[in-house]
Image (cartoon, rainbow, N blue to C red):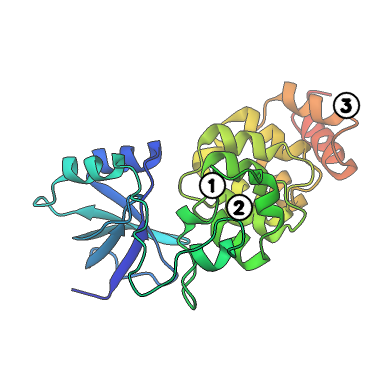
Amino acid sequence: MSLTHRVSLEADQATREALAARGLFVPSETSPALFSRVEVVCRFPSGAEQSYSGQVVNLMQGGFYLLLDASVDISAIITELEREPSPPEPSADEPSVDSETHDEESVRSTPGMPKPVWQMIDYNSEISVRQQLADMALADKLRLARGAKRPVRAILVRDSEKRIHLEVVKNPKVQDDEIFEYSGINNLSPAALRWIANQKKYVRRLDLRLNLIFNRNTPQDSALRLMKNLSSANLRRIMNSSKARDALRRAARRKLMQDGVI
């Protein structure tokens, strides 16, 4: 068995769908060998932790997919996911904390240990999620973007710091309809747009490809590549659109001329 990996699970649709197939996405900066066996320590929203083992079946940027062993009780994992977080018990050797004067950050964080992603946003706080994100350091935003829930992704993908955009689109929980929306955001980072343009599962959608082509932040080489198999009607649309860059309009015109359409 190789090194143990850790993952914080959330009771979201992506996790449930993966578990239904006995799978689990494990974020990791280091990739184990394909088909190797690994052990993961899963932390649940309740705070409980449990170890599981399985086989690495797919490697991706930012992590890998694990096929859990047949002996793993999937129903027990799902049951644990549904449990409510337990309130922390006060330590007998620590004084009680005055809710009006305590430093919230010192109570919620363990010195020297980064918060798990699922604890980085307090949805019950009077402070809006948007403001909580605005108050975060860049390193925390980048870490959160890799595992954020959908409402948080929708804010982070529009952050002024463009490095965050790439981490959002690479988030393994992101849905296809979100990627379509992101591809039309005019200030999305070129790196994020290039990453989307390189994902075959996304650019099969014609409407998404056109979003990328018309988005002026999409790197020109990526946009030109996406134009290769377009119909004459869509090439005409690009050629006549003021939204398309001049280079793309010229390329569309050349292709139509080569095909004898104009």
Residue 199, x across and y down, in percent: 54, 47
Instruction: Work out whether residue 196 or residue 37 is closer to the camera in this orientation and state it.
Output: 37
Residue 12, x across and y down, in percent: 40, 39
Dot 1 alpha-carbon crowd within 10 angstroms: few under 14, some 14 to 19, many 20 or more: few
Reply above or below: 10 against 208: below
**Secondary structure type for disc 2:** helix
Dot 3 alpha-carbon crowd within 10 angstroms: few under 14, some 14 to 19, many 20 or more: some
Residue 109, x across and y down, in percent: 49, 67
Foreground disc of the pair 1, 3: 1
Q: Which residue is mark 3?
A: 240
Name the kind of residue labelled 2 in the image: Trp
Name the kind of residue labelled 3 in the image: Asn
Position of residue 174 in the picture relative to residue 90 (left or right): right
Instruction: Work out whether residue 55 or residue 244 is closer to the camera in this orientation and state it.
Output: 55
**Secondary structure type for disc 3:** helix
**Secondary structure type for disc 1:** loop
Instruction: Work out whether residue 15 or residue 213 is closer to the camera in this orientation and state it.
Output: 15
Q: Residue furthest bottom?
A: 112
| Residue at the spot 74% in from the left edge and 39% down from the top edge | 185
Q: Which residue is mark 1?
A: 199
Name the kind of residue labelled 1 in the image: Gln
Q: Which residue is mark 2?
A: 195
Q: Which of the 4 image quarters holds residue 75?
A: top left
Q: Quadrant of the C terminus?
A: top right
Contact check, label 2 and label 1, Cβ < 8 Å = yes
Q: CA distance from mark 3 to mark 2?
A: 27 Å
Reply above or below: 191 against 183: below
Reply above or below: 244 against 218: above
Q: CA distance from mark 1 to mark 3?
A: 28 Å
Contact check, label 3 and label 2, Cβ < 8 Å = no
